[in-house]
Image: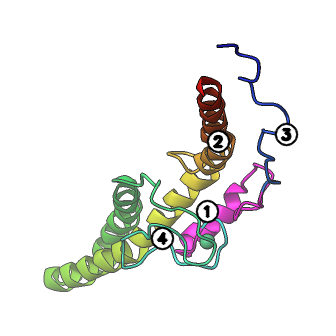
Amino acid sequence: MQHNNIYPTLEDLPITEPSQPHSEASNGERDLKTALWRGWRRKCPCCGTGSVFQSFLKVRKSCQVCQQDLHHHRADDGPAYLTILIVGHIIAPLFLHVFITWRLEPLTLFTVFSIGAVALSLYLLPRLKGAIIAFQWARKMHGFGAEEDNWSESRNSAPLPQMLDNEHETSITQTD
Ligand SMILES: [Zn+2]
């Protein structure tokens, strides 16, 4: 009936292990320029070695080299928007210039510029998507910065069930 030993003593508390080095191995700061360049090259913004994409535009769940989670990205329509913006600003003035200067046949003009626009779009789209994902990673957007927090949270919450078990055992022994 007495509650003398209900609180765990220091010996009962689990010893927390020293923190493991995170795969990113940074002091919290992520270099934006390096990340953007890696993203443009369609490489993982964290290690610069693993590929971000498993197909033309499909992003891997995580990096195969450094295990950096990549599913947090929210590139959405950003790459397509930037691609249209850039391709439009290159193709439209160029089209006008070529039309005024050389007066090419309409069919020739159409063929050259439609192929050029499609080729440039296909070139830019995955690179801009990689760069946008890298930007989000460098700025720790959309959960890219939460991995360390989640990890430390899981470490801090880990001792709790053990403490409860100890308490439970104590209460059982007391009732007996
Ligand atoms: Zn990586």
Q: Residues within 10 Å of mark 2 (few under 14, many from 20)?
A: some
**Type of amino acid at the residue the image marks with label 4:** Arg
Regarding ligand 1, which quadrant of the image does it lie in? bottom right
Q: Which residue is mark 2?
A: 162
Describe the element under mark 4 as helix, strand or loop: helix
Give the quadrant of residue 67. bottom right
Residue 64: x %, y % from top left? 55, 77
Q: CA distance from mark 3 to mark 1?
A: 49 Å
Secondary structure of the residue carrying numbered label 2:
helix
Give the residue drawn at x 72%, y 54%: 30
Dot 3 or dot 4: first in sequence order is 3
- In the displayed structure image, the side of residue 42 where residue 78 appears, left or right: left
Q: Quadrant of residue 61?
A: bottom left
**Image quarter (top left, top right, bottom left or bottom right) of the N terminus:** top right
Query: Between marks 3 and 4, how big is the CA–CA gap?
Result: 55 Å
Q: In the image, which is nearer the foreground, mark 3 or mark 4? A: 3
Q: Earlier in the sequence, mark 2 or mark 3?
A: 3
The residues tagged by marks 2 and 4 sit, at their Cα atoms, a distance apart of 48 Å
Query: Answer yes or no: do the residues labelled 2 and 3 have beta carbons within 8 Å?
Result: no
Q: Which residue is mark 4?
A: 127
Measured as percent of width and height from the top left, residue 73 is found at 46, 55
Q: Can residue 176 be found in the magenta stretch?
A: no
